Image: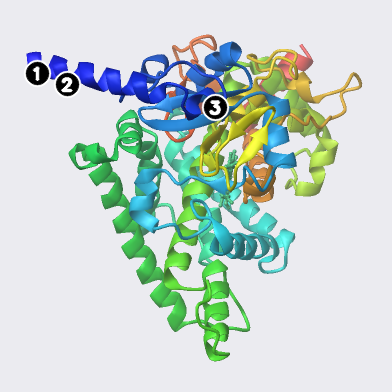
Amino acid sequence: SVSLLGALLVLVLIYLVSNFGSQEDKDPPGPRPLPLLGNLLQVDLKRPYYSLLKLSKKYGSVFTIYFGSKKVVVLAGYKTVKEALVHHADEFGDRDPMLILQDTNEGHGVLWSNGDSWKEMRRFALTNLRDFGMGKRANESKIIEECDYLIDVFKKFKGKAFDMTQPMNYAVSNIICSMVYGSRFEYDDPEFTSMVDRANKSVQLAGSPSIQIYNMYPWFGKFISKRKEFLRFYDANKKQNIEMFKNLKKTLNPQMCRGFVDAFLVRKQNLEESGVSNNHYHDNNLLSTVNNLFVAGTDTTATTLRWGLMLMAKYPKIQDQVQEELSRVIGSRQVQVEDRKNLPFLDAVIHETQRLANIVPMALPHKTSQDVTFQGHFIKKGTTVYPLLTSVLYDENEWEKPHSFHPAHFLDKEGKFVKRDAFMPFSAGRRVCLGESLARMELFLFFVTLLQHFRFTPAPGVSEDDLDLTPRVGLTLNPSPHELCAVPSSRLSLSLHLTHHP
Ligand code: HEM
């Protein structure tokens, strides 16, 4: 123990000497880091975004923090995050892949890559998600079809309380399946359910404290069982995808692409036939991009929907207002995306759900692509940057009641919907969410259809106050485990009738 103490003392000395007048004096301010630990004593790894929010109050809108020995510059507040991501889009627009993901996809795809390959894959995915089939209407009808299947699942519970996580994940995953493979799956198909369950578990694992520690101290990695588990899930889904691609290839018709994979394979073939070598359309990019669409496009949307339903159960008066607007404007007919402009209150509720739920609280890690002087601070090329979306969505200068569920944030005095610039759950700039318009369409259609068919209430014996809004932390912020009742609206219209005409 004496030698341990000695070693520690030497470390501290080296640290103090090496820091004297070093780069750190020029870095954005921040709490003083300890050797090895960095600022881990100031950060709660279960709620890192929350610790960073508190630190921003003390150190300002641009500050430095050390996760172990990993230096991160944090951007906080609407003005600062917007200035960096939008007005300095190139400088702040590179991605810093988390180590755990570098282990899997070697920098391919869209989510974790950079440079020309990223640019090409992002562009290709965007055009294909947007224009697939007959354009937007095709996406819309796929979502509407899936809503019907989900409604059937909810109906089977006959108003009894249940956990909505799995059915929601299957429904939302199927939207990505339709776009990527060109077909949906039955909810009891074991190939499908095991794939979705694995994908969702890996998203949760990737955000767990022990994997965060691995990201900070890579040499520690081999001791972490969760990393092995993560990689096992990843490999199993990769194998399954390779099989899917083989089958799609066998039945490929270049004149009629069924989904993203077909489009990719056709492009690959065309490039090969015209003798272009060294292009970006190779198997690794196909695998990673498809994997990215599932990872980024399932858990996010399903989680947001679950937050929405939980908030409806917690705030029944707001649910009343939504349902009143729905029955007045839509009635029982099938809703369409065009209806959104006539449903200002519902639109405000969805926006406010996304704001308060804050499901990607620190965006994904960015990296500076060049040296940059920003708000008087020097930030070196290659520095990891966290745009703290929490600080934008909860910015006290932008929101009247940042910590409450207050749909009026998005309504004017006449009850018309108003856009708010600080609404940034999809981030902004070069790395803004690629699935934003798809996600918004899904949130709208699923939310409306569910609320047309059901009234959401807490489980028997649980009061509205008992529904706890403290999130469970993974890579995204989930509602804590809970069950809700989906009471079919045939019974609902009866009770509304009774309340409105006593
Ligand atoms: C990136 C949010 C749905 C695909 C992101 C980022 C956020 C985000 C915050 C990181 C942006 C940054 O690093 O600055 C959300 C939310 C969603 C959602 C809140 C749903 C409510 C989707 C869907 C898809 C998708 C449905 C796919 C179809 C992606 C991709 C990226 C991304 C591929 C990486 C973009 C890049 O690095 O260039 N999303 N997302 N997302 N999202 Fe989404």
Q: Are marks 1 and 2 in contact (CB under 8 Å)?
A: yes
Q: Residue 269 versus residue 15: which sits nearer the camera?
A: 15
In the rendered structure, find residue 459 and report the number of the disc placed on it. none
Label 2 crowding class (10 Å Cα cut-off): few <14, some 14-19, many 20+? few
Q: Residue at x 70, y 14 (%)?
A: 396
List x then y, in percent, for residue 360. Answer: 54, 34
Q: Quadrant of ligand 1?
A: top right
- Direction from residue 231 to residue 139 in the image, left or right: right
Q: Amino acid at mark 1?
A: Ser
- Residue hosting label 3: 27
Q: Residue at x 57, y 48 (%)?
A: 94
Q: Is residue 417 visible?
A: yes
Residue at disc 3, secondary structure: loop
- Residue hosting label 2: 7
- Sequence-first tag of 2 and 3: 2
Residue at disc 1, secondary structure: helix
Say whether mark 3 is within 8 Å of ligand 1.
no
Quarter of the image where one finds residue 238: bottom left
- Sequence-first tag of 1 and 3: 1
> Quadrant location of the C terminus?
top right
Q: Amino acid at mark 2?
A: Ala
List x then y, in percent, for residue 426. Answer: 64, 39
- Direction from residue 142 to residue 239 in the image, left or right: left
Residue at disc 2, secondary structure: helix
- Residue hosting label 1: 3
Q: Residue at x 67, y 64 (%)?
A: 127
Q: Are marks 1 and 3 in contact (CB under 8 Å)?
A: no
Q: Amino acid at mark 3?
A: Asp
Residue 342 sits above or below residue 105 on the image:
above
